[in-house]
Image: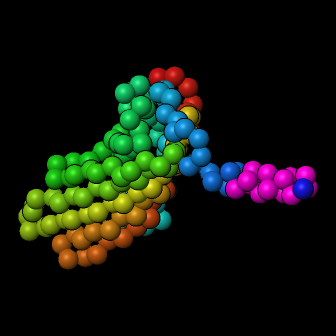
């Protein structure tokens, strides 16, 4: 009987360890300076890779899971951002953009993302798709950030 209890306890511990960011109370990102890397294998949506240093204010850090792209990839006119439901330290959302026609050119884009947040780091995986004057655009973008100090 005692051996069975240890087996069940071991299995439950393993299950808890495998649940990743969903276990425990959600954490809030700490404010401060973050080194942010953006990796994009497709040149259709900007540079292939970019690294920048950003300062996240206390307000932005507290609301990071709702507005993760606010300072990383700012939206322009004609864009609507909808945060998804947060599940533990996992989050997601969408951004839909339609640019007004300029010189006969049109652009529509959808960006769907999921991510994970820790107290001093984050990861965002985003799939971008769209249409630029009849040409299909598709890309997968990975964004990572690590706190490097105070602002």
- Residue beneath the point at 47% across and 23% down: 151
- Residue beneath the point at 91% across and 52% down: 2
Residue 33 left/right relative to 128: right
Residue 76 visible in rendering = yes
- Give x and y (percent) for residue 21: 58, 48
Which residue is at the front of the view, 81 or 19? 19
- Quarter-wise, where is residue 68 in the image? top left
Which residue is at the front of the view, 46 or 137? 137
- Residue beneath the point at 86% across and 58% down: 4
Colour setup of the view: rainbow
Q: Magenta region, mostly helix, strand or loop?
A: helix
> Total marks drawn?
0
Query: Could you tell me which quadrant the N terminus lies in?
Result: bottom right
In the image, is residue 118 part of the stretch drawn in magenta? Answer: no
Q: Which residues are magenta?
A: 2-15
Which residue is at the front of the view, 55 or 16? 16
Residue 43 visible in rendering = no
Residue 144 left/right relative to 73: right
Outermost front residue: 1
Up-down: is 111 above or below 63?
A: below
Residue 3 left/right relative to 134: right
- Give x and y (percent) for residue 91: 44, 50
Up-down: is 52 above or below 83?
A: above
- Quarter-wise, where is residue 58 in the image? top left
- Give x and y (percent) for residue 118: 56, 39
Up-down: is 108 above or below 91?
A: below
- Give x and y (percent) for residue 141: 45, 59
Outermost top residue: 150
- Residue beneath the point at 41% across and 38% down: 64
- Quarter-wise, where is residue 129 in the image? bottom left
């Amino acid at each position: 009987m005692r051996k069975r209890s240890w087996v069940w306890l071991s299995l439950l511990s393993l299950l808890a360890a495998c649940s990743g960011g969903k276990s425990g109370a959600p954490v809030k990102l700490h404010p401060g300076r973050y080194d942010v890397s953006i990796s994009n294998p497709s040149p259709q949506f900007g540079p292939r890779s970019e690294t920048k240093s950003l300062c996240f204010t206390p307000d932005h850090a507290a609301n990071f899971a709702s507005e993760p792209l606010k300072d990383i990839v700012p939206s322009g006119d004609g864009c609507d951002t909808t945060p998804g439901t947060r599940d533990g330290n996992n989050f997601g959302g969408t951004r839909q953009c339609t640019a007004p026609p300029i010189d006969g050119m049109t652009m529509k884009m959808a960006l769907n993302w999921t991510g994970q947040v820790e107290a001093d780091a984050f990861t965002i995986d985003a799939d971008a798709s769209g249409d630029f004057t009849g040409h299909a655009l598709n890309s997968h973008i990975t964004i990572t950030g690590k706190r490097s100090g105070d602002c």
